[in-house]
Image: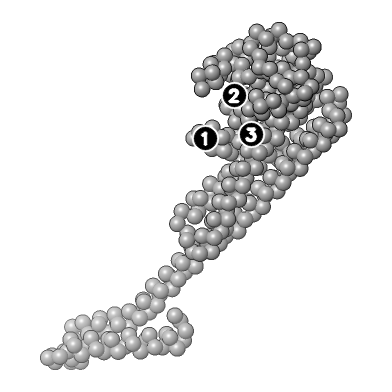
């Protein structure tokens, strides 16, 4: 943890030089600055918010100004742009940091050119740590495009896990709504829909970026690279379709929730109407007997109150029987 914090402060999160067999050797800042293509393929991963990273990108890496601005930009969307001898690739990964919302996706900016891959980010991306673990186990990438593919694939694995969680969440909501358990259903549904909409907004252009990348004719791209990025495009397309399906299912669940609430309200209103209909003649009779006129029936009888109560009860029973016959309830 202390090493990671030191790397964060220094700007250089990690850097490796690979041979064609996938063996990787970790480099320091001085070794990164002194690197030459003859040493092997270089992957440099930087925290773009640190001054040392900005100095390297602007001055030490000898990059075109367009590439520099793209790697240091504050706000980006997934895209692929061919630039001279390489590619600018912007990707988005889910935010798996503790306490963060997964749909608050993290941007990874990449520059791939012969023998070098430079990646930058502002917030920690867990896919990078997984790739570093593969490198430590001797399963590193063979070249710069293979390294980019590995990063993109690991990012998509995390996306797939979140899409699966959203799908499980809508399954649970559907079961609960069918069972009539509507407590907090509307709030949970709103959160699911918001997460699905946010993720789709980033994944759709990311799918287009992979399609663009696999279709490029470039010295960096061979048939294997094109096939790998085609697979990523297909996977991303499936996730986009899953999110579209999830949004449609969420709309159906919302309609069912609204229908249940409306039905409940109508039932309560109907019950109140029936009660009011029963009470109306009873109220009329009691009001009539309360009129200050002489010769009111049962006015002076010793059992007047009890008799009146019996009459009212009889009237109520007759009304209920009539309502039952008319199938009002």
- Coordinates of residue 213 in the picture (x, y in percent): 80, 32
Taking the image as shown, residue 119 lies to the left or right of residue 262, namely right
Furthest residue in direction front, as rendered? 137
Q: Toward which corner of the image does residue 183 lie, by quadrant?
A: bottom left
In space, the residues marked 2 and 1 are separated at their CA atoms by 14 Å
Q: What residue sits 53% from the left and 16% below the top?
A: 6
Asked if the residue at tag 1 contacts the one at tag 2, i.e. Cβ–Cβ closer than 8 Å, the answer is no
Question: Colour scheme in the image?
Answer: one colour
How busy is the neighbourhood of tag 1: few (under 14 within 10 Å), some, or many (20 plus)?
few
Q: Which residue is mark 1?
A: 100
- Coordinates of residue 134 in the picture (x, y in percent): 66, 28
Sequence-first tag of 3 and 2: 3
**Marking on residue 138:** none
Q: What residue sits 70% from the left and 35% below the top?
A: 153
Q: Which residue is mark 2?
A: 122
Say what secondary structure mark 1 lies in.
loop
Q: Nearer the viewer, residue 125 or 79?
A: 125
- Coordinates of residue 50 in the picture (x, y in percent): 58, 16
Taking the image as shown, residue 26 lies to the left or right of residue 304, namely right
Asked if the residue at tag 1 contacts the one at tag 3, i.e. Cβ–Cβ closer than 8 Å, the answer is no
User: Is residue 85 in view?
Assistant: yes
Sequence-first tag of 2 and 1: 1
Q: What residue sits 82% from the left and 36% below the top?
A: 227
Sequence-first tag of 3 and 1: 3
Q: Which residue is mark 3?
A: 93
Taking the image as shown, residue 61 lies to the left or right of residue 253, namely right
Q: Nearer the viewer, residue 157 or 218?
A: 157
Say what secondary structure mark 2 lies in.
loop
In space, the residues marked 3 and 2 are separated at their CA atoms by 12 Å
Q: Toward which corner of the image does residue 224 lie, by quadrant?
A: top right
In which quadrant of the rendered image does the C terminus lie? bottom left
């Amino acid at each position: 943890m202390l090493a990671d914090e030191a790397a964060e402060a220094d700007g250089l999160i990690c850097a490796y030089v690979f041979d064609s067999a996938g063996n990787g050797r970790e480099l320091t800042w001085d070794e990164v600055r002194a690197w030459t293509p003859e040493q092997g393929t270089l992957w440099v991963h930087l925290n773009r918010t640190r001054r040392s990273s900005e100095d390297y990108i602007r001055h030490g890496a000898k990059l075109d100004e367009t590439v520099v601005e793209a790697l240091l930009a504050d706000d980006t969307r997934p895209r692929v742009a061919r630039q001279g001898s390489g590619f600018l690739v912007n990707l988005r990964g889910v935010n798996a940091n503790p306490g963060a919302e997964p749909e608050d996706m993290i941007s990874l900016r990449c520059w791939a050119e012969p023998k070098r891959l430079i990646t930058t980010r502002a917030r920690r991306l867990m896919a990078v740590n997984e790739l570093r673990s593969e490198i430590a186990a001797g399963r590193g990438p063979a070249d710069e495009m293979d390294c980019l593919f590995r990063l993109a694939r690991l990012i998509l694995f995390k996306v797939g896990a979140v899409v699966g969680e959203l799908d499980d969440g809508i399954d649970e909501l559907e079961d609960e709504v069918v069972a009539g358990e509507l407590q907090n259903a509307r709030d949970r549904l709103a959160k699911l829909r918001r997460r699905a909409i946010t993720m789709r907004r980033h994944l759709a252009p990311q799918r287009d970026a992979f399609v663009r990348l696999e279709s490029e004719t470039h010295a960096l791209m061979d048939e294997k690279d094109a096939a790998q990025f085609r697979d990523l495009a297909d996977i991303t397309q499936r996730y986009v379709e899953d999110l579209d399906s999830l949004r449609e299912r969420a709309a159906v669940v919302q309609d069912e929730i609204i229908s249940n609430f409306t039905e409940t309200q109508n039932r309560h209103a109907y019950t109140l109407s029936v009660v009011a209909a029963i009470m109306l003649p009873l109220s009329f009779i009691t009001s009539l007997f309360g009129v200050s006129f002489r010769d009111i029936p049962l006015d002076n009888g010793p059992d007047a109150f009890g008799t009146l109560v019996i009459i009212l009860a009889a009237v109520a029973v007759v009304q209920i029987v009539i309502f039952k016959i008319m199938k009002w309830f």
